[in-house]
Amino acid sequence: MRFILLFALLFITQGSTWAQGKKVEFSTFQLSETVYMLRGRGGNVAISAGEDGLYIIDDQVRPVTNELLQAIRKIDSGPIRFVINTHYHADHTGGNETIGSAGALIIAHDNIYKRMSTEQVSIFTQSTTPPYAKAALPIITFNDQMSLYLNGEAATAYHVAHGHTDGDIIIHFPASNVIHMGDMYFNTLYPYIDLDAGGSIQGMVQAADLALSLADDSTRIIPGHGPLAITEDLRAYRDLLVKATANVQALIDDGQNLQQVIAAKPTAEWDETLGKTWITPPQFVTFIFNSLQGIHNYTPATNNSGDPTAAD
Ligand SMILES: [Zn+2]
């Protein structure tokens, strides 16, 4: 049975504070009879609630775990049975330890277990992340594909190699006509591609193509960050990735190095709308350039201010 309503807005915003004193607003959107999207602090969360209970996809940053759980309880007060992580980043796995300790089984791609159980070094963020506590680690891992059959429908996770990291999945709820893209889709901002953790622009395009192959015109798309999207938005994002990649490749074919490519502004047509929120145009160009050159880390040509002349 298909749920017809578009974008039913269920619960709006509850104010709360978190450890750093910043106000966090949680909003929950009902997308079908059983699937919800929740926005708060960190990656967007999907929630499945129904006759078989509750499971969630991603669990935000650690300091808001209690507020996240309160928001989830407004949908269903029962225990969370499973957590599926779309990838290992701390803004998608921050609730794992608390929710795992409370009895939820954590499910994730093999590479998420590998990265969460060992120290991780990021050139891009200039940070080192220690291994997570045991309770935060996945208990069940998979390689290519995995399905859960709960609440009257399948949810199928598909791994895309070398997308946002080397352990990302997208999750498709065919009956609800919803796809959670994790961080292989940033809606209304340039994507972060974690080259230091096996990401690449080529994988980001593959992930968008895969999602589009599963979608129809009325599919609701949950991005890792940014507002809820529809298929048309995802199609435009996919086209931007492809066109930006072609622009960078043309400059590489011309013999230009990374700094010259950045200075040529190959993403100029989107920079005003997508390059102001977080990832800057020079950073986005560096992700693409390094991916095309087979450089498997973020070797910056600029500092993180995004000033393309800074490294000249
Ligand atoms: Zn991420």
Image (spheres, rainbow, N blue to C red):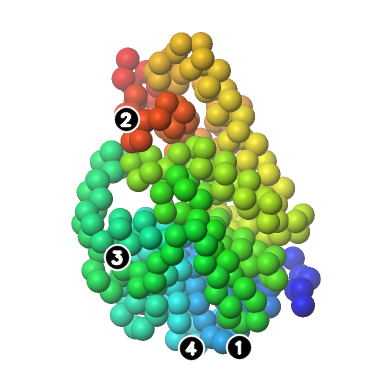
Is residue 166 visible in the rendered image? The answer is yes
Crowding at mark 2 (Cα within 10 Å: few <14, some 14-19, many 20+): some
Residue 194 to residue 63: above or below: above
Among numbered discs 2 and 1, the one appearing first in the sequence: 1
Tell me, for residue 19, which label it has, or none: 3
Report how far apart the C-alphas of labels 3 and 2 lie in the structure.
Answer: 32 Å
| Horizontal side, residue 165 vs residue 12: left or right | left
Q: Label 1 amino acid?
A: Glu
Please identify the quarter of the rendering in which residue 162 is found: top left
Residue 128 lies left or right of residue 171; in this view the side is: left
Residue beneath disc 1: 51
Density class for disc 1 (Cα within 10 Å; few <14, some 14-19, many ≥20) is: few
Q: Nearer the viewer, mark 3 or mark 1?
A: 1
Q: Residue at x 50, y 87 (%)?
A: 77
- 4 or 1: mark nearer the eye: 1
Q: Which SS class for mark 3?
A: loop
Please tell me the numbered disc located at residue 78: 4
Distance of mark 2 from mark 1, alpha carbons?
A: 49 Å
Report helix, strand or loop for mark 4.
loop
**Gap in Å between the C-alphas at discs 3 and 1?**
35 Å
The residue under the point 41% across, 48% down is 165
Q: CA distance from mark 4 to mark 1?
A: 11 Å
Q: Nearer the viewer, mark 4 or mark 2?
A: 2
Q: Position of residue 43 (x, y in %)?
A: 46, 58
Asked if disc 3 and disc 2 are in contact, CB closer than 8 Å, the reply is: no
**Mark sitting earlier along the chain (4/2):** 4
